[in-house]
Amino acid sequence: MATALKKVNWDDNLVTDIIGTYEEISAYIEGHTHTEEKAGAPPEPRELEDMIGRVNALIGRARAEKVVRVEPVAVEIRAKAN
């Protein structure tokens, strides 16, 4: 759900891992364009089990409690005029 995006623990490394995993899963789907290297026998059950574990780990990373980053605020102090 798009409304749940605000709950995602956003991290550029997480995004990179999600994209890589998405591309790898896409290679398993018939009807997608595959490289000759990927065209061939379907994945073994063990490969799919490993992929499920990786996807579940990515979901866990995305749902991890967000770290609130506080940006420093510049404060201007003015001398009181006499």
Image (cartoon, rainbow, N blue to C red):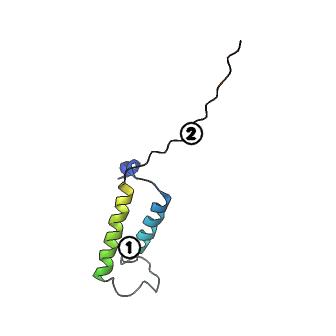
Dot 1 amino acid type: Ile
Q: Examine the image and state in which quarter residue 25 appears.
A: bottom left
**Residue 36 shows which numbered tag?**
none
Q: Position of residue 58 (x, y in %)?
A: 38, 63
x 43%, y 72%: residue: 23
Considering every residue shown, the one lying at the far top of the view is 82
Amino acid bearing label 2: Pro
Q: Position of residue 64 (x, y in %)?
A: 37, 54
Q: Is residue 74 above or below residue 19?
A: above
Depth order, front residue of 69/52: 69
Residue at the (61%, 31%) spot, across then down: 75
- Looking at the picture, tell me which residue is in the foreground, 68 or 1: 68
Q: Is residue 81 above or below residue 58?
A: above
CA separation in Å, label 2 and label 1? 41 Å
Element carrying mark 1? helix
Q: What's the mark number on residue 72?
A: 2
* Residue at screen point 44% across, 78% down: 33
- Determine the secondary structure under disc 2: loop
Within 10 Å of the Cα at label 2, are there few (<14), some (14-19), or many (20+) other Cα atoms?
Answer: few
The crowd level at tag 1 (other Cα within 10 Å; few <14, some 14-19, many 20+) is: some
* Residue tagged 1: 25
**Which picture quadrant has residue 19?**
bottom left
On screen, residue 72 versus residue 59, left or right, reads right
Expressed as whole percent of the image width and height from the top left, the position of residue 27 reads 40, 77
Q: Is residue 12 above or below residue 44?
A: above
Q: Residue at x 29, y 75 (%)?
A: 49
The residue lying furthest to the right in this view is 82
In the rendered view, tell whether residue 73 sits above or below residue 17: above
Q: In this view, does 50 lie to the left or right of 37?
A: left
Rendered location of residue 37, percent (x, y): 45, 86
